[in-house]
Image (cartoon, rainbow, N blue to C red):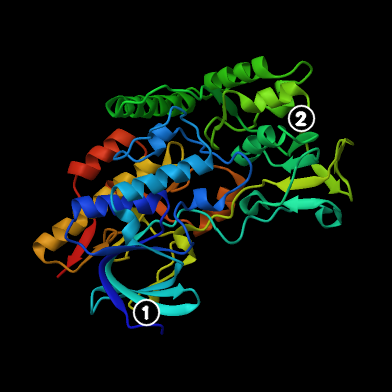
Amino acid sequence: MASPPETFDLIIIGAGVSGINAAYRVQTELPHLNYAILEGRDDIGGTWDLFKYPGVRSDSDLYTYSFSWNPWPHPNPIAEGPLIKEYLKDSIKQHGIDHRIRYRHKVQSMDWSSKSQQWTLAVDHDGLAREIKAQFVILGTGYYDYETPRPATIPGLETFKGRVIHPQFWPQDFDHTNQRIVIVGSGSTAITLLPNLAKTAAKVVMVQRSPTYIASSNNSQPVSAAPLRRLVRLFYHLMAFLGVLFYRTFPTRARNRLLRATKAQLPPGMEVDPHFSPRYRVWDERLCFAPDGDFFAALRRGNADVVTGVIRRVTADAVEMEGGERVPADAIVTATGLNMRLGGDIAMRVDGRGRPMAARAVWRGAMLQDVPNLCFLLGYVDMSWTPGVDSAVLVFVRVVRLMRRCGLGAAVPRLPAAGMPLSEKSVWPLRSTYAAEAQERLPKYGRAGPWRPRGNVLLDYVHSRWGDVVAGLQFYA
């Protein structure tokens, strides 16, 4: 061991959006707690520190994605990664959170002892093993694997003589000027990459097995005064809620509206079907946004295209389709999705017994069945992420405050003795391929009481502030 164990009241794992927001709530709502943030990387930001592909940007508006305690100060609701990271750095400096972060502290495992009522975290810090103890832990580790991206299974890819790139690890030395680039995939990453690469590439072709819904959005909202920014945030929350409600309640009308808007933006000769007519309903997968219609503008300029179908094979210098089309390529970008990994792949044990997340029920969207004193942060999937993790941490903060006031040492979510069937609704209710592959590893919602799914931003926030945070918990002195 590099040094004797340190002890804190509370540890936050992860210094991305979830962890930073949790830190603010902890230090404002529980000011007497001694806490630290453990970050495995050498900088803050999580997603916004890892991804560096051209044009990387938010796929939610930043008025709702940003922190309620530090509203997004810029006029563009969709922004690129560097500006988001700058905003995060400004947020932690404003509130002194930067002094609480310990970089290159990667948590390997967590062990709860009912005897001492503490978590013991095994941490790797620059190759040295350390132990850190805390009564409470907040997991703000995101939802995907930072080290291992989802592999792309493409016939013949190993025979390709050009460069093969995964967006999760974009090479900074790659000059795409005058290159012929094939992007394999149709999600938000592919839709972001195409217009940005097409600015200087000779040709960019998005090759997709099946299409996704793409909505153009106005990317200008000239608001500067702080009070007005809060009103704009509220407006965007309302529009997001009503939009998802409309899409889910009237899926046929929603689909027709999106396809009509898409058709109006396509270049002459390009058809909506098959390239932009998905087989699934709107919001079965995430809706992709094209700020100011940049994706369609790139298609109209003529050096970008879309090919829909099944890849037969990759050759030394091209992608060949089952339909016979041959797409020449100097580089192939495999934008085929993420590898989901909740909890940062941290081994978790309670009194020596493993507590994997798989099929474990979620209490109030904030804690896990049979796991003491642990807050598990998972944001909304069909709306902005941040309000979901904010509601969860506010619930947990209230539980901790109650425990401190009553002299309690542990709080454990317990299902009713009679048992409760788990809901068919996953904590990740999208049908994307990467999500479907991970379903058996994800926790589940219950069907009643504090185990029910969340999904209404306003009601979830009201409950997090004033609702019941005792039902479903078992407390120990």
Q: Which of marks 1 and 2 is in front?
A: 2
89 or 49, which is in the foreground? 89
Res 73 → quadrant: top left
C-beta proximity under 8 Å, tags 1 and 2: no
- Amino acid at circle 2: Asp
The residue lying toward the viewer, choosing from 174 and 34, is 174
Residue position marked by numbered label 1 in the rendering: 352
- Look at the image and tell me in which quarter the C terminus lies: bottom left
Residue position for label 2: 305
Q: Where is residue 325 in the image (x, y as percent from the top left)?
A: 88, 35
* Residue 84 position within the rendered picture, expressed as x and y whole percent measured from the top left: 46, 41
* Label placed on residue 369: none
Element carrying mark 2: strand
Asked if residue 358 can be seen in this view, the reply is no
Q: Where is residue 307 in the image (x, y as percent from the top left)?
A: 78, 33
Outermost residue on the left side: it is 406
Q: In this view, does 94 lie above or below 441?
A: above
Residue at the spot x=25%, y=54% of the render? 26
Q: Which residue is drawn at 23% across and 41% down?
A: 463
| Closer to the camera in the image, 94 or 463 | 94
Counting other residues with Cα less than 10 Å from the Cα at mark 2, is it few (<14), some (14-19), or many (20 or more)?
Answer: many
Residue drawn 23% across the image and 38% down it = 462
Q: Position of residue 381 (x, y in %)?
A: 46, 41
Task: Kindly indicate the quadrant of the structure image that contains residue 141.
Answer: bottom left
Separation of disc 1 and disc 2 at Cα? 55 Å
For badge 1, the amino acid type reads Gly
Quick check: 33 above or below 115?
above
Q: Residues within 10 Å of mark 1 (few under 14, many from 20)?
A: few
Determine whether, in the image, residue 243 is placed left or right of residue 25: right
